[in-house]
Image (tube, rainbow, N blue to C red):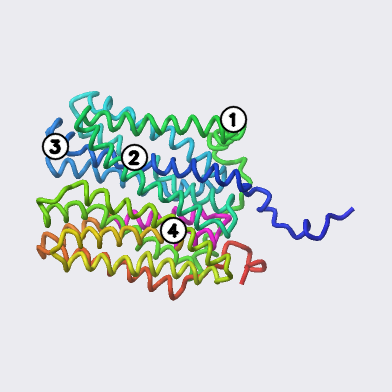
Amino acid sequence: MQPPPDEARRDPAEDTQWSRPECQAWTGTLLLGTCLLYCARVSMPVCTVSMSQDFGWNKKEAGIVLSSFFWGYCLTQIVGGHLGDRVGGEKVILLSASAWGLITAATPLLAHLGSAHLVFMTFSRILTGLLQGVYFPALTSLLSQKVRESERAFTYSTVGAGSQFGTLVTGAVGSLLLDWYGWQSVFYLSGGLTLLWVCYVYRYLLSEQDLFLALGILAQGLPMAKKPRVPWRQLFRKPSVWAAIFSQLSAACSFFILLSWLPTFFKETFPSSKGWVFNVVPWLVAIPASLFSGFLSDHLISQGYRTIAVRKFMQVMGLGLSSVFALCLGHTSSFCKSVFFASASIGLQTFNHSGISVNIQDLAPSCAGVLFGVANTAGALAGVVGVGLGGYLIETTGSWTSVFNLVAAISSLGLCAFLMFGKAQRVDLSPGREDL
């Protein structure tokens, strides 16, 4: 007896996708997970001044501790995507979160293990970077396999809003905890909440059998994994793949430069201004902007607009218009206008969540995690170089305009590459099955 025609034509991948209630539950859970990821990540920058006073660090030593996170973060992007594609992104996220949550909560204890405070803190930040580096590639892999194409942009942008929310929460609550209980309390809170989140996911959303199976696969070097090998040669022959990688690199580099230098820009340009204004307002704007971009993207696709046209429009907003507002920052002496321009630039950059970040899932859903890992590794490395180059430009020119010109130049190059070569057709299929 043959199956009905509709069932015969059904994509087997659809059987593994989440139902609407499952998607809603996981979206909320991953939104909170991303928030806690950034709470743990931003805890050190928030506490650096207080820790420097306690341990006698100078600016150079504090810079070593702060930058050491990215040393580890760059190394596990591809590994995280590979593991997510092979054993399941949700399992990779849960296992890594349990480890980085424990390290974050134990940071005050590590700081007092001996007299080598700088060594212990640098090592803990490298380890935290290694563990957090798997998160977004594993998340990309998970959503590419579990979420319908018509809902991916809103889901990814909603989950991605957790990064702004986590930065906002740590900046606001962390400042209060610093004043009331000392820097140790910031690490205890962010690490402890992460471990509580891990317990919730383990108890209510993941089966014990799946988790132990994933651990067994990892312990045996992935021999039980059934996923096909990543078609690297086929992927890297496609201009659309290179366009996606370069656009992601540009978006990440621009974001890291603004994230690193905006606080210093405001402190030096407007020394009498309130710090909480420029540290909070841009992130308050970014959260609804991220949600709106995802809703708008999925709505346009549901109305019949071509997927690639929508993705390119999102990049025009995320890389093009955002860089215009960044340029405006270098040509105003008004504090209110500067806060407005910074908020607009940061807010519009969240449109990248519904553009290039989802486009990688369009191109290669079967290996989206590892491909995103490649792109994000390039972005993280470029971000480190870009932040350093920004500091060099400030020192040599004495003008903040040069930094914002750098952001605009990098964003424009990424946008041009994506507009010229970006596509949304799958490139991970065998040549005979490609969706051309």
Residue identified by numbered label 2: 39
Q: Nearer the viewer, residue 386 or 336?
A: 336
Give the residues drawn in magenta, as a range. 356-383
User: Does the stretch in magenta take in 360?
Assistant: yes
Residue at 34%, 37% in the rendered image: 127
Residue 171 counted in the magenta span: no
Which one is earlier in the sequence, the residue at label 1 or at label 3? 3
The nearer-to-camera label among 1 and 3 is 1
Residue of label 4? 292
Horizontal side, residue 91 vs residue 12: left or right: left
Q: Mark 2: which secondary structure?
A: helix
**Disc 1 or 4, which lies upstream in sequence?**
1
Among the 4 quarters of the image, the one containing residue 102: top left
Helix, strand or loop at label 3? It is loop
Q: Which residue is mark 3?
A: 57
Location of residue 159 in the rendering, given as x and y in whole percent from the top left corner = 46, 49
Circle 2/circle 1 CB separation < 8 Å:
no
Kind of residue at badge 4:
Phe
| Callout count | 4
Residue at the image point whose x is 50% and y is 56% from the top: 154
| Cα gap from disc 2 to disc 1, whole angstroms | 27 Å
Name the mark nearer the viewer: 1 or 4. 4
First in sequence: mark 2 vs mark 4: 2
Which type of secondary structure does the marked residue at label 4 adopt?
helix
Q: Which mark is residue 208?
A: 1
- Quarter placement of the C terminus: bottom right
